């Protein structure tokens, strides 16, 4: 039964890795809106999506007591770390008043992966099969794998982790270049309301635990608002 559940999650999250659908920027001409992503921009967006999906797979593993899912999530994080160098760049963001915003206990991807491996081991103590999976994930040479190597972009996804209280709000600015492909993503351990704005226009306003959006920003600053819902939430914001 565990194997069947695990196969099901791969089907559910598999669509996340389809080619990026580039949303139009506000105020851009039609031909620019439809311009496809370059190979480098697609790779950057895909690395962000991979981290979001790793979080989804980890959530599945915890919910259904499937340690194999936790190992896979950890492997995804190691993969992104290997393909992007250190894979631990932080977003240079500011609050509404221009003051720099710091993260809350940011950890690098290798640390996060190890935590998932430890969590999986505790869930299925003494399993030689699981230990072998973890060992294989750690030893895998991701950059040499042709299926992964095309996403080897130095300086990988930028990210910052924060906490938002029930009824609280965090609002900050992420710098992007007008007209250049941009990706914003979020993962959270509990539902939060995420509002994505460009200038005075709202691009997205929805309750999520996982979120990814790729588009070409028009004129105006990009702001992300994260609002607390029924529980204190720890979240991470990603950008390319």
Image (cartoon, grey):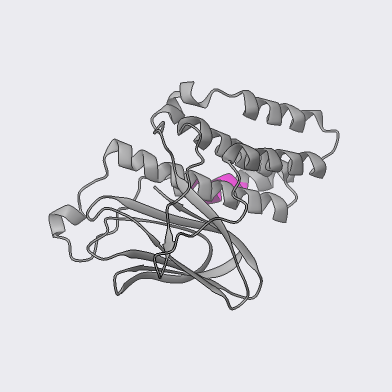
Would you identify the image quadrant in which residue 123 lies? top right
Q: How far across and down, in percent of the image, does residue 215 sit?
A: 30, 56
In this rendering, would 227 be left or right of 178? right
Nearer-the-camera pick, 142 or 182: 182
Nearer-the-camera pick, 228 or 102: 102
Considering the whole magenta stretch, tell me its main secondary structure: helix
Which residue is located at x 51 percent, y 26 percent? 142
Q: How far across and down, in percent of the image, does residue 42 sit?
A: 34, 42
Instruction: Kindly give the residue lying farthest to the bottom in the view shown.
Output: 167
Residue 3 visible somewhere in the drawing: no
Q: How far across and down, in percent of the image, does residue 50 sit?
A: 49, 44
Residue 132 versus residue 111 in the image, above or below: above
In this rendering, would 36 be left or right of 80? left
Residue 52 visible somewhere in the drawing: yes
Q: How far across and down, in percent of the image, does residue 72 sit?
A: 62, 39
Which residue is located at x 60 percent, y 35 percent? 75
- The span picked out in magenta is 8-14
Which residue is located at x 81 percent, y 42 percent? 122
Which residue is located at x 52 percent, y 53 percent? 160
In this rendering, would 19 be left or right of 207? left
Q: Is residue 11 one of those drawn in magenta?
A: yes
Would you identify the image quadrant in which residue 10 lies? top right
């Amino acid at each position: 039964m565990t194997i069947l559940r695990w196969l099901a999650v791969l089907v559910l999250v598999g669509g996340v890795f389809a080619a990026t659908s580039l949303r139009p920027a506000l105020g851009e001409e039609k031909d620019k809106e439809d311009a496809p992503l370059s190979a480098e921009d697609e790779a950057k967006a895909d690395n962000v999506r991979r981290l979001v999906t790793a979080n989804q797979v980890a959530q599945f593993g915890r919910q259904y007591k499937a340690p194999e899912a936790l190992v896979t999530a950890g492997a995804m994080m190691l993969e992104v770390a290997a393909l992007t160098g250190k894979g631990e760049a932080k977003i240079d963001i500011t609050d509404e008043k221009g003051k720099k915003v710091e993260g809350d206990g940011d950890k690098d991807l290798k640390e996060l992966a190890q935590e998932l491996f430890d969590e999986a081991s505790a869930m299925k103590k003494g399993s030689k099969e699981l230990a072998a999976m973890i060992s294989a994930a750690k030893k895998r040479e991701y950059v040499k794998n042709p299926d992964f190597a095309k996403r080897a972009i130095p300086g990988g996804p930028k990210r910052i982790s924060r906490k938002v209280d029930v009824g609280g709000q965090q609002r900050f600015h992420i710098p992007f270049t007008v007209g250049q492909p941009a990706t914003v993503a979020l993962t959270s351990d509990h539902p939060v309301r995420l509002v994505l704005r460009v200038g005075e226009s709202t691009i997205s306003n929805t309750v999520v635990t996982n979120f990814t959006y790729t588009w070409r920003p028009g004129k105006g600053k990009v702001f992300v608002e994260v609002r607390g819902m029924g529980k204190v939430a720890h979240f991470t914001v990603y950008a390319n």
